[in-house]
Amino acid sequence: MNVGVVGVGSRGRYLARAFSQRPETNLVAVCDVSEQAIQHAREELGPDVHYYPDLEEMCQREPLQIGVVASWDPAHRDHAVTFLNHDLHVYHEKPMAQSIEDCDDILRAWEGSTGTLLVGLELRYCTLCQEVRKLLDADEIGDVKLGMAVDNVSVGGRYYYHNNRRLKSFINSLMLEKGTHTLDLMNWFIGSTPTRVFAEGGLDVYGGNEANDKRCRDCERKETCPDFLDVSKFIYDYGEKAKHAMDFCAYAQEVDVDDNCLVTVRYENGAKMSYMECHFTPDYNRHFTLVGDKGRLYAFYNNEQEFVIRVHKRFEKDPVEYHPPKAPGGHGGGDPRILDEFIARAGRNEHSCPGAVDARNSAVIAIAAAKSCETNLPVNVPPFRLPQE
């Protein structure tokens, strides 16, 4: 199956290589509006791949079966819909889109297509989350009534506040850019549709009075600043070198994206969930707590795969502890496993969208939470129903 990738920044180049290395897929073309990004991709991917500045042109000229959306978040809706309108199987990086309407446009475009749509929420496929799902399906804690999730993001200052992700006008919020992974998992674990969201956020560490054009490389405090970024050495947690990373000061005046938030969500089935995200913690991990009518489940995730699950049943003294095995690949082994599923479905030429409505709902929670932070009011969120649901 021939593959085309739109967006060849760090994540896009990672995915382009991943598809090029699979026996079932052949990377034939990539697209990006940035000449610099195309040049970096050309250096890595070689002369056999075709390079385009325009997605529609790539789709018309190349015999593609698979389209990969790895562009900046504001372009996700248009790029996904373009691929789907060309009847391709679409692997779509998270978040799905930046507005509820755009998310729903993608799902409607999928309904009118014949291919598979899979959103890259790869944590569903890591061994920890797969084991949590199995325990829930085995009724170990009964019906989930309450959920709590925490995103500790020690790299927030390095990943987000040096580039255009520090602007609400570009990413909406870090709950959408970062938190959709965890929000998607909570939707999956709870097994219901969110109906109402309330949130409070704050910009309590980053931002400040520095000039908007100030850069780490020129800073007089670069030897002592804990958020100094050396772009020549920066590597993302999935192992990709950031070849054209920005190093603007994290304490600039224009920074307006909250660096912490607290969110509460109510679901159709009556369950309730709280979510906390912080970008100045000392650790980088996720915590999940699910309370059912038969017991409580706690799960711990980090990139080192020091996975732990504890199930404590009501009226029993001691919890049972599980240690899911490590798996190769980024995101706790989720990166290669989600591609396994996508390629298998595309190979069978399925018209399917596994987890896509939950992916939409994780984005919807984040979008509603950002609105709630601005208005100090709860936000009711509309459902999306597929015909087969």
Image (tube, grey):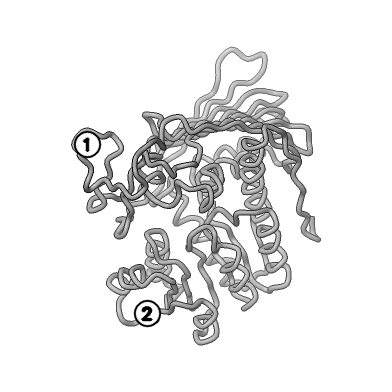
First in sequence: mark 1 or mark 2?
2
Measured Cα–Cα span from mark 1 to mark 2: 43 Å
Q: Quadrant of the C terminus?
A: bottom right
Crowding around mark 2 (Cα neighbors within 10 Å: few <14, some 14 to 19, many 20+) is some
Q: In which quarter of the image is residue 196?
A: top right
Tag 1 residue = 221
Q: Label 1: state its secondary structure.
A: loop
Q: x, y percentage for residue 200?
A: 60, 31
Q: x, y percentage for residue 344?
A: 55, 66
| Mark 2: amino acid | Val
Image side of residue 232 versus residue 364, left or right: left
| Marking on residue 49 | 2
What residue is drawn where x is 55% and y is 39%?
131
Q: Label 2: state its secondary structure.
A: loop
| Mark 1: amino acid | Arg
Q: Residue furthest bottom?
A: 61
Can residue 389 be seen from the camera position used here? yes
